[in-house]
Image (cartoon, rainbow, N blue to C red):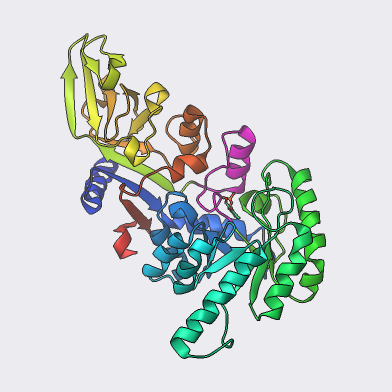
Amino acid sequence: MGRERNRSCQLKEFSLARRPTYIKVNLETILDNLKILKTYLAKHTEIIAVVKANAYGHGAVGVSRFLEKHGISHFAVATALEGEELRAAGIHCNIQVLGNASEDEISTLYENRLIPTAANVKFLSSWLRHWRQQQRNTLGVENVGPVGSVVIKVDSGMSRNGCQPGQLRSLVEFCENNNIPIHSIMTHFAQSWDNPDFTQTQMNTFTETVAPYRKRGIKLHVANSGAILNNIGVDLDYVRPGISMYGQPPDTSEFGINTTKKAGLKPAISWYAKTSIVNDLDPGRVVGYDQTYKCTENERIAVIPVGYADGYLRNMFKNGYVSTLDGVVCPVVGRVSMDAITVKLPEEAKECREFILLASDFNDLNSAVAISKIQNTIPYEVCTNIANRVPRLYEFSGDTVTIAGV
Ligand SMILES: Cc1ncc(COP(=O)(O)O)c(C=O)c1O
């Protein structure tokens, strides 16, 4: 009975998705993960939900719309165009664009009321010039009116984005002299999950660098997921969780998986697909491009219309598995094509037509962790690789809705 119900829900979901494959995002799980993360934070510390890279593959619009309704008031994306997508979808909250702000993005930042992350005075000058020019063009006024706020980023040791500690003063002074509001000053950690010593060294550099500005009440933030779970920077003004909000571990190490599990975080994403055709093949038949698989007996091979263009990575033909809804394991055989995979159905799954490509747990078979192990990568990459052309469905309180209904 439960099984039949499950299947009929699934069939409904395929029709909602309008494709024989879809990603399902459990929004309740994301909310639960955020509740867990909040227990690590000081009372006044607010969350900047990191929804860059299509919310780590979970669908930036769907996730952000939901979180905005559930009290999140700050989002972070990686590019101005990602911010524009959220504004077009009706997101009103603060949206910070992480990374060193680029002058090429200024008009998109301006038009969408996005908060850039500044790393040098050159950008700040262009930002100011753009705002002044717009005010001159639209209001006919010179050098008056508010300028959009900025986040200033300090490189505390990762040697990637941000100004060097010794340059911070000149950026702050430029903002103060030109009435550019400083939303906050931030840094980012290089190894917050598993290197508390290096993280603490970065934290000390940051704390020392921002001390004069902290006294003046400028807001600060440093913590990504690993830092939050390790209680570093959790009493500042904001934290910026990404991967932990989606319930995935940072990597495939026992340590990463156990830390995630122990915290009670759960993956929110799963990926389903059904067959487009099933073939009974004689021994000796080869399957897929380059004939990498040859049937050794009479075999039932299901074609699932999902390929590497959907983010089902090509290497999966080596050790990849999908599972039936009942948990029967079916190996991916033959090469992964751009738009299809071929799967061998064992006896006990011969009649199955619906499959789980990515399970929302930490299993050894088809979880993001398992796929990361096969691909020699990390769950961040597995999730962000899932292409836009795979429809996202959102589940909350047992109801499944399409993105438009969120
Ligand atoms: C500046 C910044 N803050 C926060 C995050 C979120 O990190 P995580 O997903 O590890 O929580 C990222 C992600 O790369 C980032 O670049």
The answer to whether residue 45 is left or right of residue 365 is: right
Could you say where residue 286 lies in the image, as x and y percent from the top left? 24, 15
The structure residue drawn at horizontal position 45% and vertical position 36%, both measured from the top left corner, is 367
The answer to whether residue 270 is left or right of residue 289 is: right
The answer, for residue 44, to whether it is visible in the render is: yes
Viewer-proximal residue among 174 and 364: 174
Could you say where residue 115 lies in the image, as x and y percent from the top left? 55, 69
Could you say where residue 209 lies in the image, as x and y percent from the top left? 80, 62
Could you say where residue 325 lies in the image, as x and y percent from the top left? 32, 36
Q: Which residues make up the magenta segment?
A: 241-266
The image quadrant where one finds the C terminus is bottom left
Residue 262 lies in the magenta stretch: yes
The structure residue drawn at horizontal position 69% and vertical position 47%, both measured from the top left corner, is 158
308 vs 23: above or below: above
- Image quadrant in which you'd find residue 177: bottom right
137 vs 404: above or below: below
- Image quadrant in which you'd find residue 150: bottom right
The image quadrant where one finds the N terminus is top left
The kind of secondary structure the magenta stretch mainly shows is loop
